[in-house]
Image (cartoon, rainbow, N blue to C red):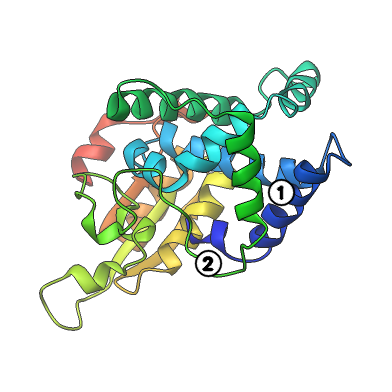
Amino acid sequence: MNEFDQEPMATYRRGFAQKRLSHKDDDPIELYRILDFFETVGLLVNRGYLNEEDVWNEFGAWILNIDADSDMRPNIEYEKQSDPNSYAAYLSLVERVKRIDAAHHGTASQVSKPQLMDFYREELRIVGGTQVRTHGPSAKSSDRPTVPGAWAGSVLEGKAMSDKLSIPNPRQVGVLVVDDADVIRKTLRNFLREEPAIKLLGEASNFSEAISMTAALKPDVILLDLHMPDDRSFNPEFVKANP
């Protein structure tokens, strides 16, 4: 999730920190840009595209500090009044991160007001390209254990998948993305473009498109959301024929 360290997110983070430290804006627009980012991360975790332990290690500090900022909670509650599903994936992610944090430390981290203000002061120094702080036991991604099956681990660690392959100039792996959510397809598209070993062949927003595109494009890998509006048209034999 390199976007969190790049522009425009770096500017949003600085702006949000400045407003929280000055107490001049109790409904900062930057908060929603940051929440939108973590809403997307939460959706990716829920659908199995990101590993929750990796997310805790990369973003736990941010997620726990925002959650500890009691002055910001009414903004989320207000959004939920107009749409009960607002930031549902983000709130689910918060609970996941708290659970993982408690498992690592015996209890979930308790952020005091002085610690929260120190966190915001540190954010004032963020510039585009600065590596995100890690919340886990090691600040070096190369020291973290690899979690089997974590799709975006190579992206989170900042290493291209081709760097991990043992053969030179590997053939690109053809991938078809199938998901009815625009934000998921967009995020996966950005991930895939960072991987030299992967070629994005196409995107489908339902099972019907997926079946026809698979027959035409012959992808090596299909990133498939099994819960889409036209799931009645889904044939389990499709998965067996395209393992």
Mark 2 is surrounded, within 10 Å at the Cα level, by few (under 14), some (14 to 19) or many (20 or more) other residues, namely few
Label 2, on which residue?
130
Say whether disc 1 or disc 2 marks the residue closer to the N-terminus: 1
Is residue 191 positioned above or below 41 on the image? below
Residue 137 can be seen, yes or no: yes
Q: Position of residue 152 (x, y in %)?
A: 35, 52
Q: Give the spatial CA distance, label 1 vs label 2.
A: 16 Å
Please tell me which residue is depicted at 66% across the width and 22% down the height of the picture. 85
Q: Is residue 220 left or right of residue 73?
A: left
Is residue 129 positioned above or below 230 on the image? below
Among the 4 quarters of the image, the one containing residue 82: top right
Among the 4 quarters of the image, the one containing residue 137: top left
Label 1, on which residue?
17
Is residue 81 positioned above or below 184 on the image? above
The residue nearer to you, when weighing 147 against 116, is 116
Please tell me which residue is depicted at 37% across the width and 60% down the height of the picture. 155
Among the 4 quarters of the image, the one containing residue 63: top right
The residue nearer to you, when weighing 85 against 90, is 90
Please tell me which residue is depicted at 66% across the width and 41% down the height of the picture. 117
Residue at the outermost left position: 166
Q: Amino acid at mark 2?
A: Thr
Is residue 83 positioned above or below 166 on the image? above
Q: Position of residue 219 (x, y in %)?
A: 30, 59
Residue 216 can be seen, yes or no: no
The residue nearer to you, when weighing 54 against 218, is 54
Mark 1 is surrounded, within 10 Å at the Cα level, by few (under 14), some (14 to 19) or many (20 or more) other residues, namely many
Please tell me which residue is depicted at 20% across the width and 44% down the height of the picture. 241
Element marked by disc 2:
loop
Element marked by disc 1:
helix
